[in-house]
Each structure stands twice: as C-alpha cells, then as structure tokens.
Image (tube, rainbow, N blue to C red):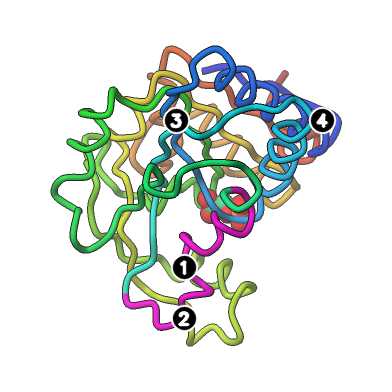
Amino acid sequence: MKIIVKNSKKEIAEEVSDIIINGVKENPRIILGLATGSTPIDTYKDIIEKAKEQKVDFSKVTTFNLDEYLDNPDETQSYRYFMDTHLFNGININKKNTHFPGIDNIGTYDEMIAKSGGIDIQILGIGRDGHIGFNEPGTPFDSKTHIAELKEETIKDNSRFFRSIDDVPTRAVTMGLDTILHARKVILIATGENKAEAIKSMSEKNDVNCPASILQKHQDALIYCDKEAAELINK
Ligand code: PGA
C-alpha cells in the first residue's frame, strides 16, 4: 500500500482518470471495479471528458460495482442510477457489461467476478469509520459479497443524498473485504478533513476495526489523499 498526497481533489481526479483511460487503451476488455459516493464523481467526470477527447472505446469494458442498497423504494437513489448518471451515460459502455451486487446474486457475485477474469482496477472511497464498500468496522477480512447492515454514522453520512434520514436504506449488498483484496490494483481516494482520522487509522493499525486497513496487505494499492485527508499522517 502506498499513500500519495496531492494538493487538491482536482489533481487526484486528473491522475486517477488517466490511470483508467490508459488502462482501457492498453486493454479494451479491462475489468473495472467501481464505487459510488461523492468522492469519485470528479474522476468519473474527467474520464467522460478524456474518453470523448481521445476517442476511447469502452464498448468491451466490464464493470462490477462495489455495492447496492437493499429495500430501496426510490430508483433514483440506487447506485445503478448514480453510475448511469455520473459515468455510464457519458461513455460508450455496453450496459449489459455493467454489474451490481443484489439480492439475486449475493452468493454468485464473487464467482461472476472471477469468471470474468478478475478485477484489474478497483476504485474505492472510504467512510469516516474506515469502511470500504459497506464493510463496516468488525467485518471479517475474509468476507465475500454479503448483506451488510449500515451503521448509524454511515446512515447519517448518506442522508445528505436523501429527503430525510428515515428514507436512507439500512441494508445493502456489498463486495466483501476479501473480494476487494482480490483486485489486481486498488485505488482508494480520500478527500477532505473529515476523512483524516480514517486515513490515519488505516495507515497505523491493521485490524477489523478499520476495514480499509486490509489494504496494507495488498501489493498494488494506491491511497490518493488531498492535503486535508492526509493531515494526520506522518509523511
Ligand atoms: P463519500 O463516501 O465518497 O460520499 O464520502 C465514501 C464512502 O462511504 O465509501
């Protein structure tokens, strides 16, 4: 695991979008693992712009998203809707090649990923409590795709996207920590001072109380932080 500190979230988006665009150019059949949340939005915007400018073909790319809400009555709050809006509708990806975990494929999602050849690059955000995907503190490091109960802090954080906190689903299906660790390359992005504690703990301890700390075991994990997110770590 390598921590890379950049001056701004704009710089991070420029660099991470380059990694993805170059990955697709080198391997048009690349398998991408994707994340939702506010963190990757700038990166997705840059990918769309660069794909247009450089005429990059996404038609053979396959994607697996990290997670999806369960019991979510509002389609516009689904992570499928988020990905369509922030990335898929802006590139020429074949939606049939875009996958999400859900109630019907909990037991087979890891197998689907493995059969497709495995994830080449996995994009991640991080929660204030150190979660990745919906793997909250306490989730075993050997977990596969599973149903997760959202912690109160996560429900509160996610309520900013909903009309009221009561509308936030309390369960989700998420790739497990072992699923994520299997990706060949992992890129975790953390921006803003509210992520500083999580970055500090993922860089110091390595235990289930900080799920992101599993990445210490990964051979090719890049942790992109802006100055604010990196302010509590020793450089
Ligand atoms: P955020 O969420 O990008 O909206 O901060 C990150 C996460 O919870 O993984």
From mark 1 to mark 4, how far is it between C-alphas?
28 Å
Where is residue 24? Give x, y as percent.
55, 22
Front: mark 4 or 3: 3
Residue 44 at x, y percent in the picture: 66, 43
Q: Is residue 182 left or right of residue 90?
A: left
Per the picture, the main secondary structure of the magenta-coloured stretch is helix
Residue type pointed to by label 1: Ser
- Residue at figure coordinates x 32%, y 70% from the top left: 70
Q: Is residue 128 visible?
A: no
Q: Residues within 10 Å of mark 1 (few under 14, many from 20)?
A: some
User: For mark 2, what is the residue?
Assistant: 74
Q: Please name the residue that numbered disc 1 is placed on.
A: 78
Q: CA distance from mark 2 to mark 4?
A: 34 Å
Front-lying residue, 76 or 52: 52
Q: Give the residue at mark 4.
A: 11
How packed mark 3 is, by other alpha carbons closer than 10 Å (few <14, some 14-19, many 20 or more), is: some
Task: Give whichever of discs 4 and 3 has the lower sequence position.
Answer: 4
Instruction: Work out how far the residue at label 3 is from the one at label 2, CA to CA, in angstroms.
Output: 30 Å
Disc number lying in front (1 or 4): 1
Tell me whether circle 2 and circle 1 mark residues in contact (CB < 8 Å). yes
Name the residue at 23% across, 53% down: 146
Q: Residues within 10 Å of mark 2 (few under 14, many from 20)?
A: few
- Distance between mark 2 and mark 1 Cα atoms: 7 Å
- Indicate which disc, 2 or 4, sits on the residue closer to the N terminus: 4
**From which residue to which does the magenta span run?**
71-87
Residue type (three-letter) at the residue carrying disc 3: Lys
Q: Label 3's element?
A: loop
Taking the spot 62% from the left edge, 42% from the top edge, the residue there is 91
Q: Element at badge 1?
A: loop
Residue on which disc 3 sits: 60
- Please report whichever mark, 1 or 4, sits nearer to the chain's N-terminal start: 4
